[in-house]
Image (cartoon, rainbow, N blue to C red):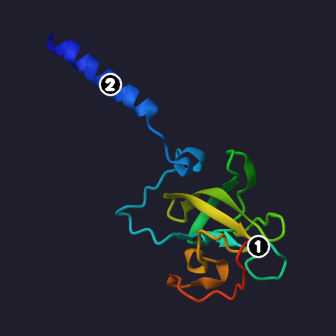
Amino acid sequence: MNKITVFVIFVAAILLTDCSKSHNSTNHINCDKLVTDTLGTSDTAKIYMPNAFTPNADGLNDYSFPITENISTIDFIIYDENNNIVFETIQIGQGWSSAPNPNTYKKYYYKIQVTTTSNHKIGMCGELYALKCIPSSMIMSDFRFQDQFSQNGFTLPTNEMLANCP
C-alpha cells in the first residue's frame, strides 16, 4: 500500500466513526454557530442565565430571561426537545413563561447570542427547566432561579418552595 492509499483509508475511517457516534443533544439542539470573541479584550459585559423558573403566577421566578450587563443587542431563543422554537426575542429583559401541567416539570434548551456595548459577541447555551415540582432525579440545589441572583452570580438562597413531583 502506498502512502496515499493509507491516508485515504485513515480519513474514511475517521469520517465513518464520527457518523456512528451519538452527539450531545444540547449541542445539536441549540449551540450551533454561537460566537464569543471577548477573550483578551477587557470587555466587561456579562450574561447570567438561571436554569429554572416556576411559571405558576405567584410573582416569584415566573419568567425565564437572561440577566445581562453592558449588552447592546440580544437574540434569546428557547427550544423544546424536538428543536422547535417556543420563544424568541431580541428585547433585552423580555422573558418567557410556559404553561406545564400542574405537578410536573419540562426541560427546554436555550441559546443566547449578544453583542456587547464594546461591539464584541458572547454566546451561550444550556438547559432550562419549567418547574411546578422537583423531578425525583434532581434536588432543589441543582437549580438556579432568578431570585438567587446577586452581583456575584447566583449566590443567594431561593424563596421557591416546590414539592417533589409525583
Q: Hey, which quadrant is residue 140 in on the image?
A: bottom right
Q: In this view, does 16 lie to the left or right of 111?
A: left
Residue 153: x %, y % from top left = 52, 80
Q: How crowded is mark 1: few (under 14 residues within 10 Å), some or many (20 or more)?
A: many
Query: For this rendering, which residue is in front, 72 or 100?
Result: 100
Residue 7: x %, y % from top left = 23, 19
Residue visible at 49% across and 51% down in the picture: 35
Relative vertical location of residue 155 with respect to residue 43 in this rendering, above or below: below
Q: What element carries label 2?
A: helix
Q: Mark 2 vs mark 1: which is more N-terminal?
A: 2
Tell me the residue that label 2 is attached to: 13
Q: Residues within 10 Å of mark 2 (few under 14, many from 20)?
A: few
Q: What element carries label 1?
A: loop
Tell me the residue that label 1 is attached to: 132
Identified by mark 1, the residue type is: Lys
Q: Hey, which quadrant is residue 28 in on the image?
A: top right
Residue visible at 27% across and 18% down in the picture: 9
Q: What is the number of callouts on the image?
A: 2
Residue 43: x %, y % from top left = 44, 68
Q: Hey, which quadrant is residue 110 in on the image?
A: bottom right
Distance from the alpha carbon under mark 2 to that under mark 1: 47 Å
